Amino acid sequence: MTDEKQKKDLLIATLIVTVVILLGGLDYWIGQVQTTLELLELAYGENFGLFNNPMNF
Amino acid sequence: MNEIFASYKRTIIVSAVLLLILVLELLNWRTAVYGGLFPLFEWLQRSTWLGYVATNYGSIYALVQAIHLLSMALLGGTILLMDLRLLNLSLKTMPVDVVVENAYRWFRFGLMGAVVSGIFLAAGVAEKVYYLPVFWAKMLALLGGSLFVIFFKIPLLRKAGTNSVWLIRVVAITSLMVWFTVAATGRWIGFVG
């Protein structure tokens, strides 16, 4: 029973930490993509499209 | 009360630590500490033999950089071995515990090599990296990733076995993402500043 409880404790703790790290990582990378797109828009105006070559005006 | 604490010790400690981090963030503690860290970085680059050698001897810096990259390759390799096996994408004929235990042994060597060589490399450019947000992102990911593997991923696989398949897969995906962040931000440091 004690071993079963320890296992449950470990599962819950791991789940909490995993969710926090996963959401933190996703937030970081989505933020980076957003910032990059905003900078590209600032540099090349509204004509900028994700699959356009920004050097072709 | 004591029984609840004894039964859910790990969960309570984790929740308390996360709550503490949240409170410190709300109190802007990180910003307050950040300013006070610069003298330490300045001292590391200007007043230690590490900083002196790293700044003045390019050949030694290159040699340590090679050791750092090889350690990171070892670290990344063992992470890929473990996580792809946990996701059932590679080494399918080998038992999970055999793959994980063997990879974890080499993971520790890789981590040690990367940290020791990383301190030397950072000493050479300490005043520069201090101002790079990506350097702090790497340090956070490295610390988080190491603690995650040592205190949660490996104990989970040792104690829970492969019974909690869905949790193990989420853990493997999270681990891959964290170490990808460490690698990507590490390379990023080389291209900014």
Image: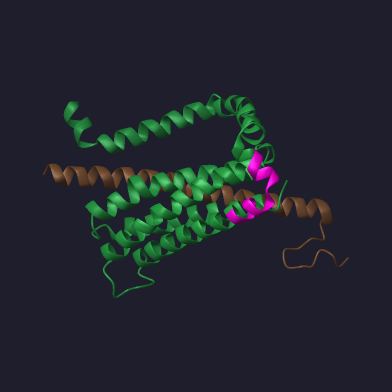
Chain colours: A brown, B green
Q: Residue at x 64, y 31 (%)?
A: B47
Q: Nearer the viewer, residue B142 or B60?
A: B60
Extent of the magenta region: B52-63
Examine the structure image and report whether residue B56 is included in the region drawn in magenta.
yes
Image quadrant occupied by the N terminus of chain B = top left
Q: Is residue B161 left or right of residue A40?
A: left
Residue A37 part of the magenta-drawn span: no
Residue B124: x and y, percent?
Answer: 65, 42
Q: Is residue B1 left or right of residue B133?
A: left
Query: Who is closer to the viewer here, B43 or B191?
Result: B43
| Residue B34 shows in this picture | yes
Residue B170 appears in the figure: no
* Residue at 50% in and 46% down: B116
Residue A22, position as x, y percentages in the image: 46, 50
Q: Nearer the viewer, residue B74 or A26?
A: B74
Q: Main secondary structure of the magenta part?
A: helix
Identity of the residue drawn at 47% across and 51% down: B113
Q: Is residue B87 above or below residue B67?
A: below
Relative to A44, B54 lies left or right: left
Q: Position of residue A17 (x, y in %)?
A: 39, 44
Identify which residue is drawn at 63% across, 51% down.
B61
Whether residue A2 is situated above or below residue B66 in the rendered picture: above
x%, y% of residue B103? 36, 61
How many discs appear? 0
Q: Residue furthest bottom?
A: B93
